[in-house]
Image: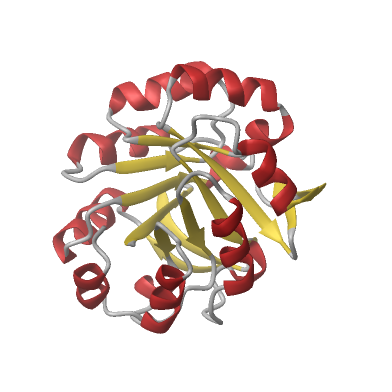
């Protein structure tokens, strides 16, 4: 399993939110490019970059995303407000290894099938989950769709993976939702990346034991709860 630091962008800064709430910002660092570079220096071999403003229609941090892609020496997966095929192509051409799509992908399966078919293995679908229900539009809208039903629909597509975020655990350092992640890993035909609540090496080892391909880590790294050197050393691939 690979550990992947999260670089979440808001108003030009790198931030960490508690519980997926834009009113609960706990971490703010003013130079996201330097933050991304620091994770590479610790030994991480992949980065997870998300434009939170684009995801919620508040604005765009695309220039910062491009700067991170230009400077990065490791693969970078990029997400946040990606709702057009042109933007998918733009980001892949700019150097993103994989592009993460969520809202439109889950609300318009035909659109997702088209971009996944044109870029097999390069599209990751973000399934943000709150109490087993899929949420979209920056965690604002809850769909009448159980996560396992969503996985069943997505299994037919040539995706690069599923990113499952336990929104109810996001940024709270209370541990990941292991039953959720285990169920998704068992049901999915593609690699599953877990996010939300990871706060210990035990969490990471438990996810690995349950067949998770990668864990996106935010708050625990930014607050020093997890030692980045130790995490990067044990979970590199």
**Position in image of residue 76 (x %, y %):** 31, 43
Q: Residue at x 18, y 40 (%)?
A: 71
Determine the residue positioned at 39% across, 20% down.
Answer: 90
What is the image's colouring?
A: secondary structure
Q: Position of residue 13 (x, y in %)?
A: 40, 52
Residue appearing at x 27%, y 53% in the figure: 36
Quadrant assignment, res 179: bottom right
Q: Nearer the viewer, residue 137 or 106?
A: 106
Which quarter of the rendering shows the N terminus?
Answer: bottom left
In the image, residue 93 sits, relative to residue 77, either above or below, namely above
**Left or right: residue 141 compared with residue 118:** right
The image quarter containing residue 59 is top right
Q: Residue at 27% x, 79% y: name it.
A: 227
Is residue 177 in view from this perspective? no
Let me know if residue 47 appears in the view.
yes
Q: Residue 98 appears in which quarter of the rendering?
A: top left
What count of labels does the image hold? 0
Where is residue 212 shown, x and y percent of the image? Answer: 45, 61
Left or right position of 215 against 33 = right
Q: Residue furthest right?
A: 144
Q: In the picture provided, is 34 more to the left or to the right than 175?
A: left
Residue 167 x/y as whole percent: 64, 63
Height in image: 76 above or below 82? below
Residue 181 lies, with reference to residue 118, above or below; the image says below
Q: Quadrant of the C terminus?
A: bottom left
């Amino acid at each position: 399993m690979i550990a992947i630091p999260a670089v979440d962008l808001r108003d030009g800064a790198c931030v960490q939110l508690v519980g997926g709430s834009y009113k609960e910002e706990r971490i703010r660092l003013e130079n996201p490019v330097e933050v991304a570079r620091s994770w590479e220096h610790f030994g991480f071999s992949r980065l997870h970059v998300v434009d939170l403003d684009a995801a919620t229609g508040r604005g765009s941090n695309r220039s910062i995303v491009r700067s991170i892609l230009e400077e990065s020496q490791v693969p970078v997966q990029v997400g946040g407000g990606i709702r057009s095929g042109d933007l998918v192509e733009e980001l892949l051409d700019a150097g993103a290894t994989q592009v993460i799509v969520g809202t439109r992908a889950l609300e318009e399966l035909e659109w997702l099938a088209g971009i996944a078919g044109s870029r097999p293995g390069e599209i990751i679908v973000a399934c943000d989950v709150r109490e087993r229900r899929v949420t979209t539009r920056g965690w604002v809208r809850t769909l009448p769709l159980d996560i396992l039903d969503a996985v069943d629909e997505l299994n037919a597509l040539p995706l690069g993976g599923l990113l499952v975020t336990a929104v109810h655990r996001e940024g709270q350092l209370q541990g990941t939702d292991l039953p959720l992640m285990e169920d998704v890993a068992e049901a999915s035909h593609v690699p599953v990346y877990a996010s939300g609540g990871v706060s210990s090496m035990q969490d990471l080892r438990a996810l690995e034991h349950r067949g998770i391909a990668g864990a996106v880590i935010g708050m625990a790294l930014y607050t020093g709860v997890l030692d980045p050197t130790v995490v990067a050393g044990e979970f590199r691939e």
